[in-house]
Image: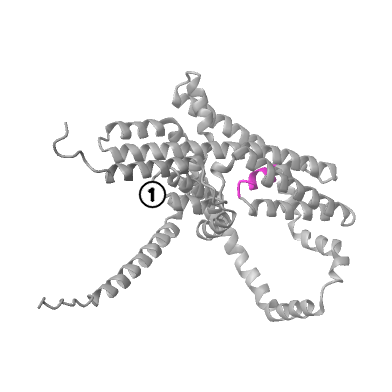
Amino acid sequence: MPPEPILIDKDPRSGDLRHVRTLLTILAVLAVLAALHAGRGFLIPIALSLFFASLLAPAVRRLRIWRVPRPLGAGLVMLLMLASVVGVVEMTVEPGRQWLERAPTVLREIERKIRPLQRMATRLDEVAAHAERVAEGTQSGQRTQTTAPARKSMLLFRTPAMLVTVVGSFFLTFFLLAWGPTLVAKIAGGANHPHTERAVQVLDSAQHEIAQYLGTVAIINVGLGLATAGITAAFGLPTPMLWGVLAGTLNFIPYAGSAVTLVVVTIVALLTQDGIGPAIGVALSYLALATIEGQLVQPLAIGRRLALNPLLVFMALWFWGWLWGVAGMLLATPLLLAAKAVTCQVPGFERIARILSPTPTPSRVQVAAERLRRKQAAARDAPGPKEGTA
């Protein structure tokens, strides 16, 4: 009679270990989030420097092709960028200061302009607004009086720190442009491990793709800014160049930038023009312009290779905006793009690349990576030569 099979009970501790691993993973994620939030004063300048270095890298590379040494080319590009920024600020600072001085009267003028539309509001909204004013009227007035000097002193306190951050980011961007590729090449040349060389190649290719994306978006945003300036000038808005610069700058932030520009130009039209007709005309014109830019020009210029899932872009904007504020919203799309550029070139991460893509259709790089992975798997599973064969 054959022996009875021995039944081995499942280790009851395996479930506890799984729960422990899940708990440790959650704690690790929370620790990373806490470190990113606590170290934002140190990390944001570095991230912004990487962003601007990727944006300016094609210009330095072009000068390198023309036999210009990389440090000299980086210095020329940074000086040109500094001159452009100073010129734009010089051109827009006075109109911006005038609009800031008018800020206390903006709400009253808006209320007067849209008074016919306010009559269409429901009684419930009026009762809720009145109840909120009654409940918070006294306390909010006291808070405003007590915190205004504190806010002013806080602004004065933070101005030197902000200046140090800007200057530090400027020089760090220059060093990344001048000696960053040389450092990466030395790391790749001195590494004997094939995985290190492959990682350096992947990161270098991802950097080139991000630079191409940011350069294309920058050119598109310049065109959008000029078109916005033309629209605002056509409807008689003052300081059209200011609104063009605002539109081109904020358009680096997907969705939120266009929405803010739309609200701003509409409010300016309400404040400076008679009636609501010009405001509606400006809003519809800019909305059509932003739609053409976002749905036609940018997809044709960038292509499907660098396209991202709109839902993930919006979630990334929300997350990084909550974590790092405006700087996080500016860096959200480049970070997603970097993740896609890396996962498209590493076999085994095709699923992440497909999730980041707006459509399930794989790109050529994804197909090539999948083909390479299958060849490697087939080579591993192939039987060796039979015995006795030459």
The amino acid type of the residue labelled 1 equals: Gly
Quarter-wise, where is residue 389 in the image?
Answer: top left
Q: Is residue 191 visible?
A: yes
Q: Residue at x 44, y 26 (%)?
A: 71
- In the orientation shown, which residue stands out farthest toward the front? 1
Disc 1 on helix, strand or loop?
A: loop
Q: Position of residue 289 (x, y in %)?
A: 75, 45
Residue drawn at point x = 35 percent, y = 68 percent:
22
Residue 118 in the image, given as x and y percentages of width and height: 84, 69
Is residue 89 visible in the rendered structure shown here? no
Q: Residue at x 75, y 76 (%)?
A: 129
Magenta residues: mostly which secondary structure?
helix
Q: Is residue 74 above or below residue 276?
A: above
List x then y, in percent, for residue 212: 54, 36
The C terminus - image quarter = top left
Which x, y percent locates residue 100? 71, 52
**285 within the magenta span:** no
Q: Which residues are magenta?
A: 245-253
Residue lying at 28% horizontally and 46% vertically, measured from the top left: 381
- Residue pointed to by mark 1: 348
**Front in this rendered view, residue 284 or 304:** 304
Residue 251 within the segment the image draws in magenta: yes
Out of 85 and 53, give the one closest to the viewer: 53
Q: Is residue 348 above or below residue 56?
A: below
Q: Quadrant of residue 298?
A: top right
Is 204 situated left or right of 234 in this image? Answer: left
Closest to the observer, 136 or 354: 354
List the single residue furthest toward the top.
Answer: 67
Task: Left or right? Give the position of 28 relative to 54.
Answer: left
